[in-house]
Image: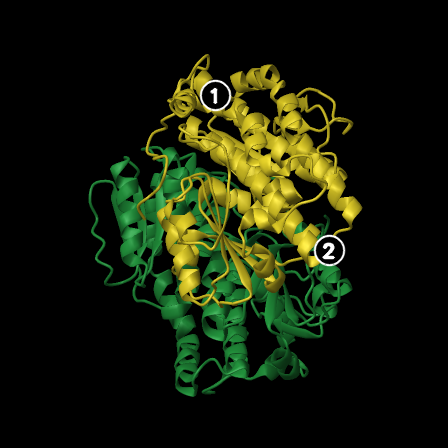
Chain colours: A yellow, B green
C-alpha cells in the first residue's frame, strides 16, 4: 500500500498547475534522493557505479559521453568538471551524429550514455555502436531502472528524480548533473588528482546542493516579472562562458520547447564572431553571470550587447556588482555555489521558460511537435 | 609593376556590386591558388606544411583544432575527414572557451590554429595557452603570411585566397577547407591509413574541386529566387547531418551576419529533441541533402518538418530524388562531390545570404556590429 501511495503522489499534480512546475519544485527532493548514498560520508565510493567500477575506472584514460537534447547538455557541463578535477580528457557527442560517423575507437575509454528514460533510440544505438567498435567500458546514467540503456551497460548510476511527466526535462537534468558531479569526484579520487581535504570540501558542497536549490527557487517572483517581458518576444539570445555555457544552451532549449520563442545560446566569447549582428532592441539577451574567474570577461561581452541597443537580463551571483539600469535587468541569486554553480543557475532559467509559457498560454506539459521520450530514430 | 597591378585587382570591385559577391565568385581561382603545389602529382607531401612536418606528423596521435566563428566551422568539418581518413581522434574547440578552461594537455597532440587574418586575438591566445601547457607541435592555417599566428607556429599552410574584404568570410572558409583536406590526405599517407590508389583518386577529386565550384556557382539564379522568399522572414533553421552539419552551421552564421535574420543550425537528428517545437509556417527550414549514406535518414527528418507545416528548402545533389511540391523547394546541384561535398554545398548557402541581404537592403560588406578581424578579446 505504501508503494502504490508513493506512485500515486508521483503522478498527481497536487497544488501545482502543471507537471513542469511541480517537477521544478521537486528538485531539492530529487537531488536528495539521487545523492542518498552520500549520507554523512566525507568521501565518495567507486562502488556506487557498480561492483566493477573501481577496476574499470583505474583502467580508463579517456571519456566519451553520448546523449541527445537536454542530456547532451548535462554531458557538456560534465566535461568541464571532469577535465578540471579528474584530469581525464572528455569528448561529448550528439548520439545521432556519433552512431553514423567514422570515429576512432579507443578501448581505454569510459563510454557514458545519458538518458532520462533509458530508452532514447539514438543514444541506445550510439552506445551499441561504441561497444561494437571495441569499447566495453560503458556506464548508464538514467532515471528508469531496468531500461534498455541500463541493461546494456556493466556500470550504472540511477538518478532518483521520480517520474518526469512534463515533456520539457527539468528534474531529470539537474539530477543527471548531480550524478555526473559524483562521478567526477569518484574519478578524481581513483586517479589521485584531488587531495582528501579538497574532496571532503566538495562532498560537503554537494550535500548543501538541495538547500542551495531551495534558496534559488525563491527568486520565482522576480523571474515571473521577467516572463511578462518575454511573452511578446520572438527571439532570445542566451550567453554563458565556461561551465555555464551548456547551461545557457539548456536555458535556450527550454524556452524553445515550451514557448516556441526562437532562443539560441552562444559561448559569450563567440559573440563578436557573428551573432552580435543580430542584437537590437527586439533581441533580449539573457546571461548567466556567476561570480567566477570569467566575470570581468563576461561584463565586457555584455557591455557590447548594451552598446548595440540590446536589452539585458542578467542572472547574477551575489557580490558580482551588477546594477539594474535602463535596459539592464538583474536577478541576484542568493549565493555562489562554486563548481556546482551550473546546477543552481539552471533553476531560474527553468522558471523563466515556465512563466513565459504561462504568459503566452502555450501548452506547458505537452508542447507541440514533441514527445517525452524519443524512442524512434 | 606586375605586383602592384595584382594587388590593385585584388581590392577593386570590377563588375561586381559588392566585395562579398566578388569573393564568392573568386572561389574557383582561390582554390586553384591554394592547391597550386599539387600540380599534376598523384600524391601529397608532408613538406607542404613545413620542413619538420613529416617527423612531427609521424609522432602525433591526436589533433586539437582551435578557432573562432567561420574558422571554427572549418575545423568542425575537418574533424569528420581526419577521423574517417587518417584515423586520428580530433577535438575542435572555440578558442575563447579553450583558453580559459582547465583542460588536459597531451604533448603528442598536433594543435591547429585556423584564422583568416592570422591575428584573431582569442585564437592566438588559445594557441599560446596550448604551447604553454606543453604542446609544441602547432600548425597555422592562415591567409596572411607573417601574421602573428603564422609566426607562432613551427608548421604552417597558407591559403592563397587573396585579400578578403567583405566582413562575412567566404573564400577564406572554402580555402581553409581545401587546406584541411590536403592535411587529411597527408596525415592519412604518413599514418598509412590509406592505399596509394585511394589517395590518388582523392587527389584527383581535389584537382577537380575548382571546376565543381564553378559548376555549382551556376545555380545562382535559382538561389536568387529563393532569396526573395527569405527577405521577409525573421527566422530560419538550417539542417545537416554528418560532415554537412558544420556546413549548416556556416550557412546559418552567414545569414545571421549579413541579413540579421535569426538563423540557427541543428544536426538533423537532434530535431526531435527540442527544436521541432519551433517549426511552423514562419520558420523556413533549409537542408543540405548530399547523396550520401545519410540521405534516407535526412528525408525522414524533413518529412517531420513538412508534417508540422514547415516550408522546406532543399539543396540536393543530383540523383537524390527530391521533388518540388507544395511547400517544398528544391535546388539540385550539378553533381556529387564525394568527400569534398561540404565545400561544394557551402557555395549556394553563401549565395543565399548574399541575395537575401540584397533583397532586404542591408549593408552586405559591412554588416552592423561586426569587424572583419577580431583582434581584441
Give x and y (percent) for residue A90.
Answer: 59, 56
Q: Residue at x 58, y 69 (%)?
A: B159
Give x and y (percent) for residue A172.
Answer: 49, 35
Q: Residues within 10 Å of mark 1 (few under 14, many from 20)?
A: many
Q: Which mark is residue A22?
A: 1
Q: Residues within 10 Å of mark 2 (few under 14, many from 20)?
A: some
Relative vertical location of residue B347 with respect to residue A6 in this rendering, above or below = below
Q: Nearer the viewer, residue B355 or B294?
A: B294
State the image quarter where residue A219 is shown.
top right
Task: Name the residue tied to disc 2.
Answer: A193
Give x and y (percent) for residue B190.
Answer: 55, 83
Q: What is the C-alpha distance between the residues marked 1 and 2? A: 39 Å
Q: Nearer the viewer, residue B82 or A304?
A: B82
Relative vertical location of residue B367 with respect to residue B332 in this rendering, above or below = above
Relative vertical location of residue B210 with respect to residue A65 in this rendering, above or below = below
State the image quarter where residue A277 is shown.
top right
Q: Residue at x 62, y 22 (%)?
A: A214
Residue A228 visible in the snapshot: yes
Task: Evaluate whether label 1 is on the same chain as label 2.
Answer: yes
Amino acid at each position: 500500500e505504501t508503494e502504490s501511495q508513493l506512485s500515486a503522489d508521483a503522478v498527481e499534480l497536487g497544488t501545482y498547475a502543471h507537471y513542469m512546475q511541480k517537477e521544478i519544485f521537486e528538485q531539492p527532493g530529487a537531488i536528495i534522493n539521487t545523492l542518498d548514498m552520500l549520507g554523512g560520508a566525507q568521501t565518495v565510493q567507486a562502488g556506487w557505479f557498480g561492483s566493477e567500477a573501481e577496476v574499470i575506472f583505474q583502467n580508463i584514460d579517456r571519456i566519451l559521453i553520448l546523449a541527445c537534447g537536454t542530456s547532451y547538455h548535462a554531458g557538456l557541463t560534465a566535461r568541464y568538471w571532469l577535465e578540471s578535477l579528474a584530469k581525464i580528457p572528455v569528448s561529448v557527442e550528439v548520439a545521432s551524429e556519433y552512431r553514423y560517423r567514422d570515429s576512432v575507437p579507443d578501448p581505454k575509454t569510459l563510454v557514458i550514455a545519458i538518458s532520462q528514460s533509458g530508452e532514447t533510440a539514438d543514444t541506445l544505438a550510439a552506445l551499441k555502436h561504441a561497444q561494437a567498435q571495441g569499447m566495453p567500458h560503458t556506464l548508464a546514467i538514467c532515471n528508469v531502472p531496468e531500461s534498455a540503456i541500463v541493461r546494456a551497460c556493466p556500470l550504472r548510476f540511477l538518478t532518483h528524480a521520480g517520474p518526469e511527466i512534463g515533456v520539457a526535462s527539468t528534474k531529470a537534468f539537474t539530477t543527471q548533473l548531480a550524478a555526473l558531479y559524483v562521478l567526477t569526484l569518484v574519478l578524481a579520487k581513483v586517479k589521485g588528482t584531488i587531495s582528501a581535504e579538497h574532496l571532503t570540501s566538495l562532498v560537503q558542497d554537494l550535500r548543501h546542493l538541495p538547500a542551495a536549490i531551495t534558496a534559488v527557487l525563491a527568486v520565482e517572483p522576480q523571474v515571473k516579472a521577467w516572463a511578462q517581458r518575454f511573452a511578446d518576444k520572438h527571439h532570445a539570445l542566451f550567453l554563458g562562458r565556461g561551465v555555464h555555457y551548456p547551461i545557457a544552451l539548456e536555458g535556450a532549449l527550454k524556452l524553445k520547447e515550451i514557448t516556441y520563442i526562437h532562443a539560441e545560446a552562444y559561448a559569450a566569447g563567440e559573440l563578436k564572431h557573428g551573432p552580435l549582428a543580430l542584437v537590437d532592441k527586439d533581441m533580449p539577451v539573457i546571461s548567466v553571470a556567476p561570480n567566477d574567474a570569467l566575470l570581468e570577461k563576461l561584463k565586457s561581452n555584455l557591455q557590447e550587447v548594451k552598446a548595440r541597443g540590446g536589452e539585458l537580463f542578467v542572472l547574477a551571483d551575489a557580490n558580482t556588482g551588477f546594477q539594474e539600469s535602463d535596459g539592464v535587468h538583474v536577478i541576484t541569486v542568493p549565493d555562489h555555489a562554486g563548481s556546482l554553480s551550473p546546477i543552481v543557475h539552471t533553476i531560474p532559467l527553468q522558471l523563466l521558460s515556465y512563466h513565459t509559457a504561462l504568459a503566452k498560454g502555450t501548452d506547458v506539459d505537452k508542447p507541440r511537435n514533441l514527445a517525452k521520450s524519443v524512442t524512434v530514430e
